[in-house]
Image (tube, grey):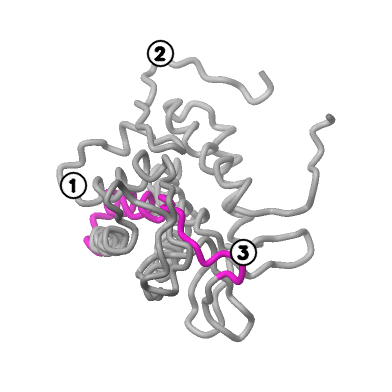
Amino acid sequence: DNGAFAEQQVTFGALGDSFYEYLLKTWLQGGKKEQWLRDMYDRAMDGAVEKLLLASDRTGLAFLSDWNGRSNHRKMDHLVCFMPGALALGAYTDPKGLTSKRAVRDLAVAKALMFTCHEMYHRMATGIAPEYVEFPTEGDMIVGSTAPFYILRPETAESLFILNQLTGDPIYRDWAWEIWEAIDKHCKTSHGYGALPDVTRVGSGIDDRMESFFLAETMKYLYLAQDPDKPIDLMKYVFNTEAHPMKIFDDSHISIEADS
């Protein structure tokens, strides 16, 4: 009850992802007035690059590992695949400018992580990513030993949409379409779409459940990645963590101080 950390685990995956996402997005939605939020976000990104960012030994795939205060756990959750989009959005809105050293670094990391998240799909027999992957020393990316399943997660789709809109590089639209084709092929049922118990085996069956975020987020982002008209401008709207577009506040917004 004193606000102290309960454990040493640091992760951009489960139980930690939305906090870092909202540091940036709350700053943006507030018209960039709460500078303390941007400062917290930038310090967090510095720490992520310094402590968590690693590369697979064999093919150099960039990934954000977990950290326990002493060593890195060489794994990355599918949840972490929101980070390419967040880093790109942070770079394009950096107060120091897109050509600043920090923004150049963050955009480069965003693109490298985006490639890894794509490979999490592309290398599987079904073309669909597992819940997490591991990067053993002197090896390459492998499916997480306890979670070969896919529950229709949206994080990679979100980042592909953001990078496509911000950079204009068509490769991100192509990757989004590739993922959609795999989902439509392997997850579709007569009444909707279901989770896959094992992405490494074609025909392993489809679970009788469809998470609500599949319609709210995954399909929305995959659709928006294909829409050339940019119906939602990322310089005018912010997507919350459930993919609802929120309009950026105008100048009448009263900023909130860090100690208030």
Q: Are marks 3 and 1 in contact (CB under 8 Å)?
A: no
User: Is residue 220 shown above or below 8?
Assistant: above
Highlighted magenta segment, given as a residue range:
144-171
**Closest to the observer, 159 or 42:** 159
Residue sitting at x 56%, y 43%: 20
Q: Determine which quarter of the picture holds residue 183.
A: bottom left
Q: Residues within 10 Å of mark 2 (few under 14, many from 20)?
A: few
Q: Which residue is mark 2?
A: 252
The numbered disc on residue 65 is 3
Q: Residue at x 49, y 31 (%)?
A: 26
Up-down relation of residue 78 to residue 32 (above or below): below
x and y, in percent, of residue 68 in the image: 75, 59
User: Is residue 24 on the magenta stretch?
Assistant: no
Q: Residues within 10 Å of mark 1 (few under 14, many from 20)?
A: some
Q: Amino acid at mark 2?
A: Ser
The stretch drawn in magenta includes residue 158: yes
In the image as oriented, which residue stretches furthest toward the left?
229
Say few, some or many: other residues with alpha carbon within 10 Å of mark 3 (under 14 / 14 to 19 / 20 or more): many
The Cα atoms of the two marked residues, 3 and 1, are separated by 33 Å
Q: Given this view, does label 2 or label 1 mark the residue nearer the observer?
A: 1
